[in-house]
């Protein structure tokens, strides 16, 4: 796995924030509390967690056009935001939130592979820090975080499984997996794609084991950061 670093409280205005670096990929994640919930949750007493994802124009080697979601939605950008949101909701006790919504914004400053998994990891810490602060202030009746979640990519490159590949390795991968797990080792989501042809199903358990072993290291790093910020 590439070098992983978290920088909590990287920006001061949001309820929670964290800059995450996985190798040369850098993502700024912020967590914002907003009053109200989507229409389908009104009156339920439950809160909501959602996420938005985007890249700065020069996060990649070539400049990309800015995303104007209302007029020209980018399918990939929307899909990754939903992936992050689903992942983070698995960590949260939504009854403890009441009818409030947390919005986690993940903005890629520099991309070198694994931006969606880095976003989950940084978003988890930003959300945790924001919720911890507001729980201490009495906003929530109990701490809304039930567990930590984290994500990692695993790819088969030249018939060899690689954990947390950079862009060059990922671009040439035969198989690509994005794995999200809880701190207890339970699966939240698995995205598996054979980029060129197919792959034998008996290889999947090996890939998942590699992901689980690597995510153990991610969770240890998260706990170190959370302890340091107390």
Image (cartoon, rainbow, N blue to C red):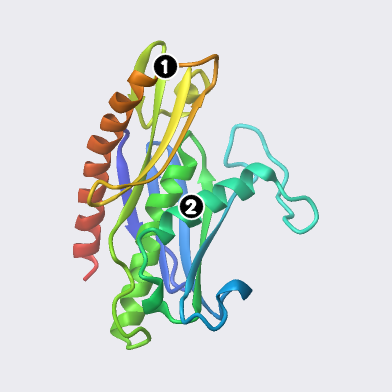
Q: Nearer the viewer, residue 153 or 228?
A: 153
User: Quick check: 63 left or right of 157?
Assistant: right
Q: Secondary structure at mark 2?
A: helix
Q: Which quarter of the figure has residue 61? A: top right
Q: Nearer the viewer, residue 193 or 120?
A: 193
Q: Is residue 141 above or below residue 207?
A: below
Residue 56 visible to the viewer: no
Q: Nearer the viewer, residue 109 or 53?
A: 53
Residue 138 visible to the viewer: yes
Q: Which mark is residue 58?
A: none
What residue would you read off at disc 2? Answer: 84
Q: Which quarter of the figure has residue 97? A: bottom left
The residue at the point 54 percent across, 14 percent down is 197
Q: Secondary structure at mark 1?
A: strand
User: Quick check: 209 left or right of 189?
Assistant: left
Task: Estimate the x, y position of residue 193 in percent, counting from the top left.
Answer: 50, 27
Q: Is residue 108 above or below residue 142?
A: above
User: Quick check: 81 left or right of 212?
Assistant: right
The residue at the point 52 percent across, 47 percent down is 109
Task: Estimate the x, y position of residue 190 in percent, counting from the top left.
Answer: 42, 39
* Gap between marks 1 and 2 measured at Cα: 25 Å
Task: Estimate the x, y position of residue 176 in percent, counting from the top left.
Answer: 46, 27
Q: Quadrant of the N terminus?
A: top left
What residue would you read off at disc 1? Answer: 157
Q: Which quarter of the figure has residue 206? A: top left
Task: Estimate the x, y position of residue 148 in percent, counting from the top left.
Answer: 29, 57
């Amino acid at each position: 796995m590439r070098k992983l670093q978290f920088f909590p409280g990287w920006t001061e205005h949001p309820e929670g924030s964290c800059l995450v670096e996985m190798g040369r990929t850098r993502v700024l994640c912020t967590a914002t509390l907003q009053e109200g919930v989507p229409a389908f949750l009104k009156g339920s007493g439950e809160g909501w967690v959602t996420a938005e994802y985007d890249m700065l124009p020069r996060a990649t080697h070539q400049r990309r056009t800015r995303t104007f979601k209302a007029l020209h939605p980018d399918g990939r950008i929307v899909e990754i935001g939903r992936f992050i949101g689903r992942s983070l909701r698995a960590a949260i006790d939504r009854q403890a939130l009441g009818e409030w919504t947390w919005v986690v914004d993940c903005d890629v400053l520099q991309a070198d592979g694994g931006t969606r998994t880095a976003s989950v990891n940084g978003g988890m810490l930003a959300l945790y820090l924001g919720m911890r602060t507001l729980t201490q202030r009495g906003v929530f009746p109990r701490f809304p975080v039930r567990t930590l979640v984290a994500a990692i990519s695993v790819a088969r490159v030249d018939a060899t499984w690689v954990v947390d590949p950079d862009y060059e390795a990922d671009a040439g991968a035969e198989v690509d997996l994005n794995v999200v797990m809880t701190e207890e080792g339970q699966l939240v989501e698995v995205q598996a794609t054979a980029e060129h042809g197919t792959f034998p199903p008996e290889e999947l358990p090996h890939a998942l084991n590699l992901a689980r072993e690597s995510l153990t290291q991610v969770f240890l790093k998260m706990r170190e950061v959370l302890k340091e910020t107390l």
